[in-house]
C-alpha cells in the first residue's frame, strides 16, 4: 500500500508550512514514529513523524519550498515493488484520487432572513425585556 505524507497543521493559525530539511531521502527505510522532515511554521520549527512504516518513495515538495496544510508532500511505499507506482502518482500519471469539487452554497432568500429577524427581536428594545417590569416598579417608574 502507498501512503501519503501530508503537510500537517502545526498550529491553529497555520495555513502553509515551509519544508526546512528532509531528514530521510528517497529509498530510505522509515519506521513508524520516526522523524521524516522538519517544517517551519508561522511560529516554530517542528519535526514531522511518519504515521506508517515503509520506504520513502518520492518527495513531491523539496526542501526550501512551501506547501499548503493538508497537501501531499511525499509518498511512502510499504514494499520496494510499490515504489514505481508511487513515482507514477508523484508525477501525476498514476491512480491518484481525483479531487472532489465542493458543493456550491445556495443563497438564502432575504425575505426569509428578514422574517426570522423580525420575529426574534422584541419591539421597544431593552426597555421591554421580560423581568424589567418588576425593576421599573421598584424604582417607581411605572
Image (cartoon, rainbow, N blue to C red):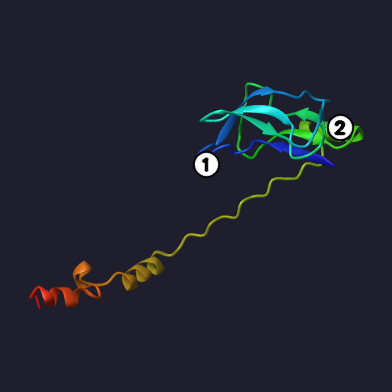
Binning the other alpha carbons within 10 Å of mark 1 as few (below 14), some (14 to 19) or many (20 upward) gives few
Q: Position of residue 133 (x, y in %)?
A: 18, 77
Q: Is residue 17 left or right of residue 78?
A: left
Residue 12, disc: 1
Q: Look at the numbered disc 1 and give the secondary structure of its residue.
A: loop
Find residue 86 and report its image quarter.
top right
Image point 69% across, 45% down: which residue?
99
Q: Position of residue 62 (x, y in %)?
A: 69, 23
Image point 65% across, 27% down: which residue?
38
Residue 50, disc: none
Binning the other alpha carbons within 10 Å of mark 2 as few (below 14), some (14 to 19) or many (20 upward) gives many
Sequence-earlier tag: 1 or 2: 1
Find residue 134 and report its image quarter.
bottom left
Q: Position of residue 97 (x, y in %)?
A: 75, 45
**The C terminus lies in quadrant:** bottom left
Residue farthest toward the right in the current orientation of the protein: 81
Q: Is residue 137 above or below residue 26?
A: below
User: What separation in Å lies between label 1 and label 2 (alpha carbons)?
Assistant: 34 Å
Residue farthest toward the left in the current orientation of the protein: 140
**The N terminus lies in quadrant:** top right
Image point 12% across, 77% down: which residue?
137
Q: Look at the numbered disc 2 and give the secondary structure of its residue.
A: helix
Q: Is residue 94 left or right of residue 129?
A: right
Q: Is residue 32 visible?
A: yes
Nearer to us: label 1 or label 2: 1
Q: Is residue 21 left or right of residue 12?
A: right
Q: Position of residue 95 (x, y in %)?
A: 81, 42
Please say if the residues under marks 1 and 2 sit with CB atoms less than 8 Å apart: no
Q: Quickly name the residue at label 2.
A: 83
Find residue 45 and report its image quarter.
top right
Of residues 83 and 133, the one nearer the viewer is 133
Amino acid at each position: 500500500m502507498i501512503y501519503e505524507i501530508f503537510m500537517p497543521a502545526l498550529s491553529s493559525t497555520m495555513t502553509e508550512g515551509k519544508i526546512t530539511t528532509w531528514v530521510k531521502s528517497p529509498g530510505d527505510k522509515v519506521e513508524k514514529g520516526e522523524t521524516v522532515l522538519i517544517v517551519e511554521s508561522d511560529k516554530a520549527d517542528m519535526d514531522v513523524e511518519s504515521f506508517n512504516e515503509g520506504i520513502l518513495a518520492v518527495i513531491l515538495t523539496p526542501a526550501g519550498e512551501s506547501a499548503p496544510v493538508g497537501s501531499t508532500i511525499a509518498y511512502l511505499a510499504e514494499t520496494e515493488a510499490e515504489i514505481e507506482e508511487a513515482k507514477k502518482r508523484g508525477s501525476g500519471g498514476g491512480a491518484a484520487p481525483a479531487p472532489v469539487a465542493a458543493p456550491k452554497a445556495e443563497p438564502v432568500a432575504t425575505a426569509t432572513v428578514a422574517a426570522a429577524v423580525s420575529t426574534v427581536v422584541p419591539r421597544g428594545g431593552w426597555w421591554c425585556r421580560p423581568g424589567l417590569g418588576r425593576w421599573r416598579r421598584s424604582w417607581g417608574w411605572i
